[in-house]
Amino acid sequence: LAKTTQPISMDSYEGQEVNITCSHNNIATNDYITWYQQFPSQGPRFIIQGYKTKVTNEVASLFIPADRKSSTLSLPRVSLSDTAVYYCLPQKAAGNKLTFGGGTRVLVKP
Amino acid sequence: DADVTQTPRNRITKTGKRIMLECSQTKGHDRMYWYRQDPGLGLRLIYYSFDVKDINKGEISDGYSVSRQAQAKFSLSLESAIPNQTALYFCATSAAGGQGEQYFGPGTRLTVT
């Protein structure tokens, strides 16, 4: 399984854009990049998934360069409720097992 | 109503006791999973099941067993609980196709004294 590295924590302010970069140097050809969000004492929640270039949904955007050795999750105009831990995971298409690293703890301040 | 439910939500038990954590889902998914989370860490996979007749060990299955009673039900047992099994336990489900998105339950906080 590809090993991922992401910042341990990030602080931001309401209304700002938050970008979290995850490195996955040995990602496999058939791995997708998936991001989950976890609030305290709750189960993780799927945010977005991509393979290459850019994916956008109502919650976030995901940028993956051509070499796919990293990816960046972008949260536009964060609010206090976006304070959470964000996990980057390589995942086989319709994959089953998820391997969670330590994640990035994002704190949004007023 | 929640798609994935777990019971109990909190449990305190003593070392050596047998305990069962239950998970039910209404999403009609074939795949179900059990994870544990220790404070400040990510989730680790204990067991997973792709259908009623399929059970697979995850990365930390020692000390645990599971039962897939039906498509909608997947239970986790600790045959003889020990203090280092104190953790937050999550059940999850996913469909066989699509993006493989997993839907997590609210978690069970287990304390073994």
Image: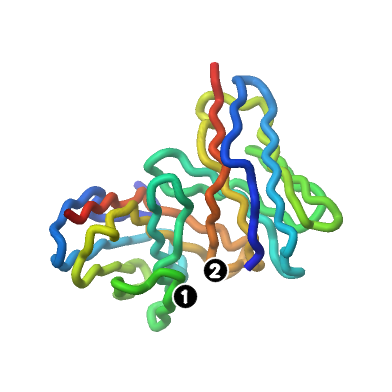
B19 shown above or below A65: below
Amino acid at dot 1:
Phe
**Where's residue B83, x and y in %?**
23, 58
In this rendering, would B43 be left or right of B22?
right
Q: Residues within 10 Å of mark 1 (few under 14, many from 20)?
A: many
**Where's residue B50, x and y in %?**
47, 75
Label 1 SS: loop
Q: Residues within 10 Å of mark 2 (few under 14, many from 20)?
A: many
Numbered tag placed on residue B50 in the rendering: 1
The residue that appears at 54% across and 16% down in the rendered structure is: A110
> Where does label 2 land, which residue?
A96
Mark 1 touches mark 2? (CB < 8 Å) = yes
Given residues B51 and B113, the one toward you in this image is: B113
Residue B26, located in which quarter of the rendered image?
bottom left
Residue at the far bottom: name it. Answer: B53
Residue B49, located in which quarter of the rendered image?
bottom left
The residue that appears at 78% across and 50% down in the rendered structure is: A64
**Where's residue A66, x and y in %?**
86, 55
